Amino acid sequence: MDKLEKHVKETLRKIKIKKNKRILVALSGGKDSAVTAYLLKKFRYNIQGFHINLGMGKYSEECLEKIKELCRLLKIKLHVYDVKKEMGSSMCYIRTGIQSRAKGQIKNCAICGVIKKWIINKQARKLKADFIATGHNLDDEAQTFLINIFKGSPKLSVNLGPISQGEIDKKFIPRIKPLFYAPEKEIKKYSLEKELPIEYKGCPCAMDSYRIQVRKFLNTLSDKKKKNIIENFEKILPRIKVNDSGVKYCEICGEPSRGRICKRCQLIKM
Ligand code: AMP
Ligand code: ZN
């Protein structure tokens, strides 16, 4: 078996996902989520595709085309949502508004990430999914863990890990990351070998300079060292305590939230 396939099989075994569970794979058009869908299908999991069209011109159109092709190839159903329909305007428009009010303090990817998560959870619940699978890989997770430490907020890392932790709530669909232990290099190689339809151009709006800096630093390390970072994180995860009183429902939109108002509604209100 291929090294990457072994990594993913081990991860799925570790998080104990049964084959009859309904998994929605969040597809961006990029290699990580495409490989996630490909491998889950190969291992005979019950999957469907899910995509949010961010309305970012040609880039979004190309992503959607690749995703449609991938889902045809894998013979899986695809659900497409439009950010304009869900939020009232395109991602660029939403971001510009929030950033001008927040005086540029909030990064593009942070805004987009919060909004995507909100839409995915809400719609996945309507589709009666048991899990949402994303394409986050070892490199992404090691970066996020280090960024949280550098920013002095290690508690934010409580959301990392191959399966979402914390309160079980009927309105919250647990998220899984089958590529959690898989290095980015291996995923790219695999996606090229399998000739999967993929948009290899990155998002034109991804300008999170801090993450780029941490990625550059991590890329000076071997995959083994990146894995050590993740394994150390897993050792301390049970000791990270979050001061919250469980899941609440956002007073504005009714979606599950750690605080009175969810992150999406906090951004919109800004
Ligand atoms: P990102 O936040 O762009 O780093 O993406 C992380 C993961 O979120 C990807 O691997 C996908 O699983 C998912 N994702 C990103 N963009 C989209 C999108 N437009 N629609 C659905 N899922 C997405
Ligand atoms: Zn809300």
Image: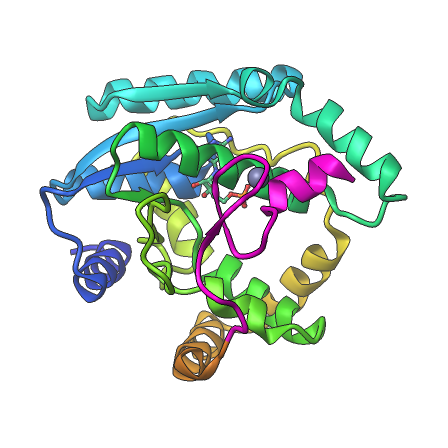
> Residue at the location (37% across, 46% down)?
172
Any part of residue 165 in sight: yes
Q: Nearer the viewer, residue 71 or 169?
A: 169
Which residue does the image show at 55% across and 15% down from the upper left?
A: 85
Residue found at x 47% / y 62%: 159
Q: Is residue 225 magenta?
A: no
Q: Which residues are magenta?
A: 242-270
Horizontal side of 120 relative to 129 (left or right) equals right
Camera-nearest residue between 133 and 103: 103
| Residue 235 % position (x, y) | 40, 83
Q: Assess whether residue 264 is covered by the magenta stretch.
A: yes
**Vertical placement of residue 45 versus 154, above or below:** above
Q: Position of residue 248 (x, y in %)?
A: 47, 53
* Count of numbered tags: 0
Overall secondary structure of the magenta section: loop
* Percent x, y of residue 185: 45, 55
Instruction: Locate the N terminus by quadrant.
Output: bottom left
State the image quarter where residue 125 is shown.
top left
Instruction: Name the residue at the front extreme.
Output: 251
Query: Is 235 situated left or right of 47 in this image?
Result: right
Quadrant of the image containing the C terminus: top right
Colour mapping: rainbow
* Image position, residue 120 (x, y; %): 43, 35
Q: Nearer the viewer, residue 74 or 93?
A: 93
- Which residue is drawn at the image coordinates 43% and 46% (left, top)? 188
Residue 195 visible to an observer of this rendering: no
